[in-house]
Image (cartoon, grey):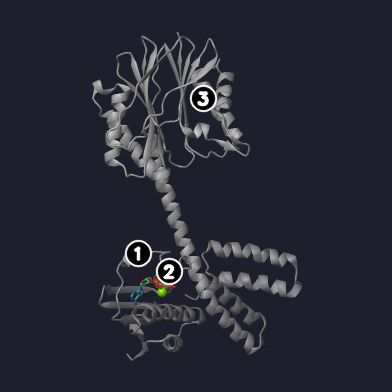
Amino acid sequence: MEKTDVSLQEMYKSILEGYLHTGSEHALYEAQQFSRQLIKENMTPEEMVNLHVVVARELIPDLPSEVLEANDFLLEVMVGYGLAYREHQSLRDRQQQLESELAVAAQMQQELLPKRIPKSPVLDIGIKTVAADVVSGDYYHFIEDGNDHIGIAVADIIGKGVPAALSMSMIKYAIDSLPEQRLQPSALLENLNRVVEQNISSNMFITMIYGSYDLKEHKFQYSGAGHEPGFYYNHSSRQFVDLNTKGLVLGVMKKAVFKEYEQKLSPGDLIILLSDGVTECRAESGFIERSELTEIIRKYEHLSAQEIVENVYSELEQFQNFQLQDDFTLMILRREV
Amino acid sequence: MSQTCVEVRSEWSIVAARQAGRTIAKEVGFGSVDQARITTAISELARNIYLYAKVGEICIEKVVEANKVGVKVSASDNGPGIKDLRRVMEDGYTTSGGLGAGLPGVKRLMDEFLIDSKEGEGTKIHAVKWLR
Ligand SMILES: Nc1ncnc2c1ncn2[C@@H]1O[C@H](COP(=O)(O)OP(=O)(O)OP(=O)(O)O)[C@@H](O)[C@H]1O
Ligand SMILES: [Mg+2]
């Protein structure tokens, strides 16, 4: 398709003519501007070479025939570049399409998360979750059974991107479809383990902590499946203690048994649940220490649970230069009265 | 309509097929850019025959329709055929990977592209470039 785009040809002619007369930097600047326009109009390299040849022939009437033949030779070489260029364009279009599909997936994933945080006069809950990439491998969930218990899950799907996002919806619906009496933490994890083991490819794993907070007795019963240990914070002694969340990762064994633990809370005490993206955040100086994390939490202890998690996040974000390495999820529960 | 056919069985015959294509493209009235495109397409098709089917044929002819003229390139062989056509026609699949060449390149260089390939039977490709 010999582009006989007259206007482009005239433009190029006048720019090149100007350059031949003046040899000025200004003409070269015009050439640069012109090339931007060429790219915008999808002119291929071989078309551009041809345009140059045609215009040069008009401007310099007595070009030696060797030069003309050499130009044809160049044209032949440029066809290959033209193909690579057009393939690049089509791959770029496809990438844009994939990116917008991914954005839709991320949007759908957002909708899997709880719409609101359970409100209670005796328990203050704060949650911050940020995906390192477009879609996240972290998940959290609340179950309000209307029986003075709030069920709380924090899960981390090992592996990133779309596969992680897909298995997240499975986790959500698996939890949602469990019968009431199964909401004991150990039984819940045993159930989920079965679902995950049966439905997820063997190279994907899910770690999780599930706990049930008793709003009357103020105790937190929980079980862990290979999850990053959370903390119990004792307000009066100002001490942090690790929660026992070791357990077996979900999906590894058909029949896994999960131990259940119990932590009593006094007013002002905290339960801190997190994904490994919180502790594995790294800067040039290395990983953050768990003790550094607890130090930051203690610093904001006087704030609301939501304000604490927001502040911890922004400090850690700064710490790693605003480049999140892994999905970040931090949840804080505080017994109010 | 007369057509020129070149038997492909060596690297040298690829050049002969190119030459035949260029002659007809010139006759039909294609400018130098399209001549280069048509011969590049012929090269790719002939090289595939040479590499994968060992023997085959490239035919080039002038085509005339209601109000347009063009060049038609046909490549045929009785080689192993192409198993997964859809994959092969995807950008970035060729062994040369990401250079834009190969069959998707031929499709881009020409205006019409038809491929018919059966595993174990062979491959037939028709491609037309219209003069505008
Ligand atoms: N005539 C043919 N007979 C059998 N297989 C073929 C034929 N033409 C192509 N193929 C198969 O299709 C694949 C893709 O061909 P294509 O020309 O697009 O890329 P390529 O030859 O692998 O790499 P290049 O970019 O260097 O051409 C080849 O690798 C080959 O397996
Ligand atoms: Mg090839």
- Identity of the residue drawn at 65% across and 64% down: A32
Q: Give me the chain letter of mark 3.
A: A
* Amino acid, disc 2: Thr
Mark 2 crowd level (few <14, some 14–19, many ≥20, 10 Å Cα): few
**Cα–Cα gap, marks 1 and 2:** 12 Å
Mark 3 crowd level (few <14, some 14–19, many ≥20, 10 Å Cα): many
Question: Exactly how many numbered labels are in the figure?
Answer: 3
Q: Which residue does the numbered mark 3 point to in the structure image?
A: A309
Mark number displayed over residue B87 = 1
Residue A335 seen in render = yes
- Identity of the residue drawn at 34% across and 81% down: B75
- Contact (Cβ within 8 Å) of mark 1 with mark 2: no
Name the spot of residue B110 as percent of width and height, x first: 40, 75
Name the spot of residue B36 as percent of width and height, x first: 49, 80
Q: Secondary structure at mark 2?
A: loop
Q: Which residue does the numbered mark 2 point to in the structure image?
A: B95
Viewer-side residue, B91 vs A255: A255
Disc 2 within 8 angstroms of ligand 1 (CB): yes
